[in-house]
Amino acid sequence: MATAHPLLAPATEPPHEAAAGAAAAAAEPEPAPREEGKSIVLHGALARLPVELEVALPVRDFRVRNLLALEAGQVIETEWALGEDMPLSSGPAQLAWSEFEVIDSQLGVRVTRLM
């Protein structure tokens, strides 16, 4: 089943309207180069793109049988030192350093340092 991407113009749009939309997008100012200590500001559709984030911890000798045997409340030993920040990545790019935090019985990740 095919679905339309929310950021793309529909295929049924007349050519003159699509060209006007492209001209408006081209007129949008590009962000200035990032200076040390300043954040990047994204505008328009680029700011609404979804990004999948990943926090990975090395676990020594963890096998599929260990995964299948997991029970609620079980603790798994990792090779990461307690209190040490963990890398937060999107694909191969590391974006920040983070730490785990429990909020109302849910596990979350707090960003501690940006790259």
Image (cartoon, rainbow, N blue to C red):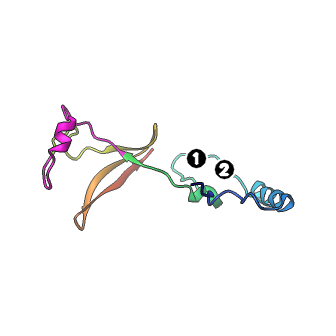
Tag 2 secondary structure: loop
Residue 102 in the figure: left or right of residue 51: left
Q: Is residue 43 visible?
A: no
Q: Residue at x 54, y 53 (%)?
A: 39
Q: Is residue 106 magenta?
A: no
Q: Residue at x 34, y 49 (%)?
A: 98
Q: Point out residue 71 in the picture as x, y percentages from the top left corner.
A: 14, 51
Q: Residues within 10 Å of mark 2 (few under 14, many from 20)?
A: few
Q: Residues within 10 Å of mark 1 (few under 14, many from 20)?
A: few
Nearest to the observer: residue 64 or residue 36: 64
- Which residue is denoted by mark 1 in the rendering? 35
Looking at numbered disc 1 in the image, what kind of residue is underneath it?
A: Glu
Q: Which residue reaches farthest bottom?
A: 104
Q: Is residue 34 above or below residue 101?
A: above
Q: Point out residue 101 in the picture as x, y percentages from the top left corner.
A: 26, 57
- Which residue is denoted by mark 2 in the rendering? 32
Q: Point out residue 94 in the picture as x, y percentages from the top left corner.
A: 44, 40
- Residue 5: which disc? none
Q: Is residue 55 visible?
A: yes
Tag 1 secondary structure: loop
Could you say which quadrant of the image residue 5 lies in?
bottom right
